[in-house]
Image: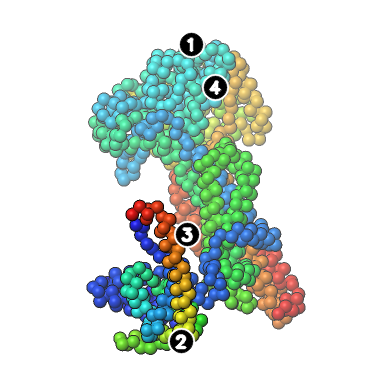
Amino acid sequence: MFDLESAIRKWKKGLAANPGLEDGTRAELEASLRDEIADRVRRGRCPEEAFRRVVEDMGGADALGREFFKVHAAHRFGAPSWARSGFSPGLLLSYAKIAVRKIRRQKGYALINIAGLAVGLACCALMVLWVRHERSFDRFHANGASIYRVIKKTSTGGSTMLDARTPFPLGPAVLGRVPEVVDFCRFQGYEGRNVKRGDTVVTLADNFGTADPSFFRMFTFPLVEGDPRTALDGPDSLVLTQSAARQIFGTAPAMGQAVTRVGGFGTYRVTGILKDFPKTSHIRVDSLVGIHHDAPAHDVAENDWATLFYYTYIQLAPGASADTAARKIAAVLNGNVKDLKAEIVLQPLRDVHLRSSFQWDLDNTAQGSQATLTLFTLAALGVLLLAIVNFMNLSTARSANRAKEVGLRKVSGARRSEILGQFLGESVLLAFLGLAAAAGIVSAALPLFNSLAGKNLAFSGLLEPLPGLGLVGMTLLTGLLSGLYPAVFLSAFQPSHVLKGGVVSGGRAQAALRKGLVVVQFALTLFFVMGTAVVARQLKYVRAKDLGIDVRGVVAGIAYVGDFNPVRSALLANPAILSAGMAEPPNKEQRGLSGVFWDGKDPSDESQFFPLTVGEDYLRIFQLKLAEGRFFSREFPTDAAESVVLNQTAARLLGPGSAVGRRMTIGRRAYSVIGVVRDFHQTSLHRPIEPMILRNGDSSTCARIDPKADRRETLAFIESTLKKFSVVPDSSVFLEFIDDRVDGFYAAERKVEAVLRLFTAVALFTACLGLLGLASFLAEKRTREIGLRKVMGARTTGLVGLQAREFAKWILVAGLIAGPAAYYAAGRWLSGFAYRTNMPAELFVLAILGTLAVALLTVGYQSLRAAWARPAEALRHE
Amino acid sequence: MPKITTSRALVAASARPIVLALLLGGESYGYRILARVRLVSGGTLKWSSAMLYPVLHRLEKDGLIRSEWRASEEGRMRKYYLITEAGREEFLAEKARWSEVHDALKKFWRRADALDPLKQER
């Protein structure tokens, strides 16, 4: 409802703001307003409209004020002194001059601010580079948006399992029956990089791969030579990448030439040359064979729905719904596999690199992790936040220095908005100085970061329009954010107060805010410290854990020898070699077998078995213990064809009672269980111990070296021995210490730890910078208090303790905030390990104490200096 | 015929003699002055409050009029303006000045009309 009285009251308030309108004038105007409204209402207007029209006719407060001002002004022209002045470039110059002067006069504070902002921005710039790189994966495919990878999702007993592998016949079966699917391509990559041309063995840089002929049609992987339609058709077709072809054939033409894949896979003829895979492709191999000729080599029949081995990629029709397609594909899958109730998840091609954490996923590419990326991005923003807080704290703390300037500017006619603009401009200027310094830091730190993160990022990536503008925008935002509170605070000064020499400490509320911000800073820093501590602890635990398998001093390598027995004897002739034989050493990734059956197997049992091919000396080499039955033996020549040994986990799957003597079918072959080996960790501790089937056969050559012997000398001996017996002349032998390899299982975690350490150091540094600034400010402010205390007999230790206690209190509060948060976050991270360390309270207490120590050392000097000052000097002023 | 609007400067210049003339007829207050001017001029002169009140204040400052706050018939406080002796003299002077200008203008108009080809044709 319109209320005339309140409307008039409001209107009067508007007039009151104008200095040109005195009380009497306003009363007169009001009287006039009321007269006219009354007149209009008499003529039949409604009060609301009458009011509106009259106010409109009368004009705004500014116009009225200007006219009345003229009555008293000496001249009739020009704006009154309070009116909005136009833009004056001279002032801008003055702002810049003041800003530069402030920076020069208070070098320490400027340095703290710029350094903090630079470090924060540098962290963000690094993250921008990294995130851009990680997100650029698989973006180059022309059909990219419509390609998906088929993920099988099964639920057993409440837990769901996502498997990137799907049955071999799924792709062809889906193509006819699901209209949304217009194309499919199966793919898999293999370990093993050795090929032979004639008699020379060449080790390629990347793995082998196998794919459907649709590979070249669906994906954008162009062939340089050869016909994409037929290149993968023949039983002996082989497509090489350009660099692989160059490696094998040099400058000689490769097309039509013969290449042998070492490892009993036969000889192929080069039918196509593929442009090298982009570095940002999750599919990266050096050679490709047709999948129809690869499947039989892995005991996978064309109609084998039981074995999971290949990845299936599908292309959907334009505009087709992925959800609908997924449901239909699931129906096809479940219809073909007895008792299967699986769901299908279609994973967009662009998500494969960053969002794959499925069982038995690609391991032959540098797989990214969205979680790690998010973690580090947040960490970088956290460091930037620390720098912003520093800026806010120091600027408001030192605001007394600016009070007179603000007062004077205001008296000379500056409006609050102008002063606000001036201070925001100053903080933006500092932020851009920080950006310039950040550029220097990034270019200097990039090699270190690259080696820590295992990337090859280039500085030039920041100069591209999008990330470049993004960074500039971020800097601007940083400047505004850090300057906003100080600007609001400083511009609010009343000139009459500050010019009279009033105190502008900001009062209690501001001190509380400052303390709160310091607490936030240290909470963030402590979070980093605690997180790093937990990660380091887990890595230590992983290294110290008894794996049930002893890999220390075990060397493994692939040698191409005919009969292994003479090799073994030759190796054992060296007293430094304790045992030698053929075995499959622990590996980071394992491929499970799903087509394992036994009498009484629950048809819904989806258990995967991990096959290992080992020789008779396996137990001795790796110091494994037999739990039951016997192990493979040279006395039983039939072992290779008929016997398997299980681990305890696998034996348990077979049901109660002894597993020894039971029959099992793997693929199409039947075996009997002759023994059970004690559980051991064949792969990283991320995974629980999984059921394993050991078969007797040829594998890598492994040897255990006496820990007392010279490692290098013995290694050279093994290498020369293997070369001597090699059936492939001039072939090189690649030997690897398995303890190093096992250590490498946790390379990703160590990467996380290394980057986290870096961030922790940077965060601690930034937070301490802020603390340093604040401490010196507080010491300065307390000069008189300290002087008085000294006069009254206080000791230096007591005075330093006084300050230390205050900072310690803040950090303890920060610890109370950071502790639970870090506990939760670290717990989530640890849950990625099947075997994990605990998180004792001491760890967190230690983190707090350590940080406290660093913080006290930082402020200690400032406190000492204040405490040492002669009280006479402190008290003389006044 | 182009629409005749009175320029700001002309309005401002004529405000003084008009207000003085009005107040010669007796005391008045802001809104009534506005209403009278509109009525007498037949709507040609539309003054706004933002224009009138500063003029009143200036006249008062110059001592040509004086003002007093009194309660109106409706009981509201209202500022009444009365002309002073100096104001009467100033009114006469203004009247003389404007008449001179008016006479001069009249002569010029006649000459201008004589030279206007459109007028001659008619």
Do labels 1 and 4 touch, CB within 8 Å? no
Q: Which residue is labeled 3 in the image?
A: A820
Question: How many labels, in total?
Answer: 4
In the depicted view, which residue is nearer to us: A286 or A545?
Answer: A286
Name which residue type carries label 3: Pro
Question: Quick check: A618 left or right of A575?
Answer: left
Q: Quadrant of residue A868?
A: bottom right
Question: Which one is in front in this view, the residue at disc 2 or the one at disc 4?
Answer: 2
In the depicted view, which residue is nearer to us: A637 or A267?
Answer: A267
Question: Which one is in front in this view, the residue at disc 3 or the one at disc 4?
Answer: 4
- Answer with mark 3 or mark 4, whichever residue precedes in sequence: 4
Name which residue type carries label 2: Thr
Q: CA distance from mark 1 to mark 4?
A: 17 Å
* Label drawn at residue B84: 2
Residue at the image point whose x is 67% and y is 32% from the top: A710
Judging from the image, what secondary structure is the residue with disc 3 in?
helix
Q: Which residue is labeled 4 in the image?
A: A243
